[in-house]
Image: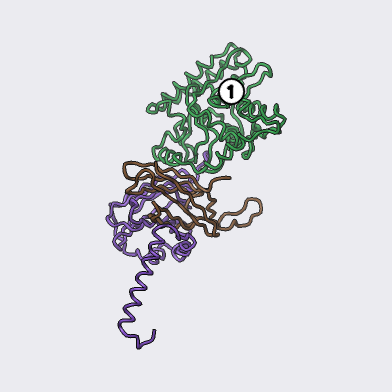
Chain colours: A green, B brown, C purple
Amino acid sequence: MTRTLCLARLLAVLLLTVCSAGQGYASPEQDREAFISAYRARIPDIPIESYVNGALMFSADALAQFNSIMEFPPFQDDIDRGRKLWEAPFRNGRAFADCFPDAGRAIAGNYPYYDSRSDKVVTFEMEINRCLRENGEAEFKFADKATMGTVTAYARTLSDGMRTNIKVEGQRALAKYERGKKLYFTRIGQYNFACSSCHLVNAGKILRTEFLSPTVGQTTHWPVFRGGDNLNTLHMRYRRCMEQMRATPFPAGSEELNDLEYFQSYLSNGLPLRASVFRK
Amino acid sequence: MADAMKIRARLQGDVADVKVLMFHPMETGLRKDPISGDLIPAHFIQRVVVTHNGKVVMEAQWSMAISKNPFVNFRIRDAKAGDKITVGWEDNMGAKASIEAALN
Amino acid sequence: MGPRMNSSAQGTRRIFLRKFALCSAGFLAAGWLYPVRLLAAQWNKPAFDSKQLDEVLKIIGATSAIESSQIELKAPEIAENGAIVPVEVTSRIPGTQSIYVIAEKNPQPLVAIFDILPGLEPFISTRIKMGESAKVRVLVKAGGKFYVTSHEVKVTIGGCGG
């Protein structure tokens, strides 16, 4: 147990050192493999495919409740409202489906991606707003449940089953990825914890009565409906976690959170997406 | 118009497994409005009736402690394709809704 | 009629009433005149309003319920969220008429009553709210007698996850 803890800590230090020394980066693929090795060492019995369930994977009792609720989720009406938002025509007659290849099916796994023209990481939510903007409609606020949350609660389900497929190609994309990685390893807030403190080094352990989920798999299942009815997007969850560390959270849709999402999503490459799921 | 409920009825041999999701706030009357601070009045489904080809097979009485957007799963015997299943509810404020499904 | 009604008149009246009763039953069976409004009056207010478990059991007549292993109750060990606790009941007791669901520490313990009429399997699955860790008690009324089983469900408020 202590050995694996040391291993994970060493890994964390190693990755960070390589980063800040500027001697060259470990490739994203090497990072992903290193993370998976670290998790396999401390969570030997659970296949990586199951990591999409997050903390649920550590309790058969919790997973059974999840499966029972997901058979016929109580938030189906919210998803239906999302569908109405998605399908409602803009004033110019076009609709969201016209902005995406294959009417938005099997695309969310490609997000976020690095856009060289704007030199920015682009998330799925940003693409929703680009569609609104280019069709003369008002953009949604990233943290608004009723608009961005609700439309993505439906739109993301169009990619259910799609495997995460994040690309980090070229120096500029790599720089964004590395920025996200640095944020992941940076201690923040009064509690002085980094994401890695809980979700890399202590994944599978219990903190404040909750199992800590590993980072691999974390980006595959958004938005969530907490308690079956409280919609939370990924950026809302990032913010809440930062607040729980007694840190001032980055805004939803900020470059910091976009880059963090880019890094984290890469680590989930190969894992299937499933949007709009129950969480406690 | 939004549905009041959704129904999934599946024939397994001669038993119909029926799952129903009802859309209802099921307010307990104990919750406070986060803005006004006032108590939100109790508003919940009290009665549920299920029929199979017109015959009542289930009657339920519920309290406000059934979860929001209630789910219920039951199984009807001697069922065959084409049979009609209805589910109706009435809440404490007198509102009613019903749905009908044919087994296939 | 008056007290001096002779037996033949009474006989006729009896036949008339019986025919009328059968007629109404026919309407009901056809689902025609099955007013849900009528049933709404049949909501056991004293039982549902009661804040005491003992009182609930007394009102429904289940004070001497017999422990039974023939009632299969599936409920979580630790509820993910107390607002939505899946509860599944299968009764193997012959002649099951009704299934009662109680959350012992809820402000009002009686959660639901399911009447299992002919044609329905004695099986119910639903989701309930629990205010705190408590026993979920399930009563089955069969052949006019009450049977009981229970299962402790823990309800916690998580730390960071919540």
Q: Nearer the viewer, residue B43 or B57?
A: B57
> Residue A247, how many percent across, how many down?
63, 35
Q: Is residue C51 visible?
A: no
> Residue C64, how many percent across, how many down?
31, 64
Residue B21, placed above or below residue B46:
above
Q: Secondary structure at mark 1?
A: helix
Q: Chain of mark 1?
A: A
In the picture provided, is C88 more to the left or to the right than A228? left
> Quick one: label 1, few (<14), some, or many (20+) residues within 10 Å?
few
Outermost right residue: A136
Q: Amino acid at mark 1?
A: Pro
Residue under the point 34% across and 81% down: C9
Outermost top residue: A23
Residue C18, image quadrant = bottom left
Outermost bottom residue: C4
- Give the residue number, with chain letter if any, for mark 1: A101
> Residue A128, how many percent across, how many down?
64, 29
Residue under the point 38% across and 57% down: C115
Q: Is residue A145 visible?
A: yes
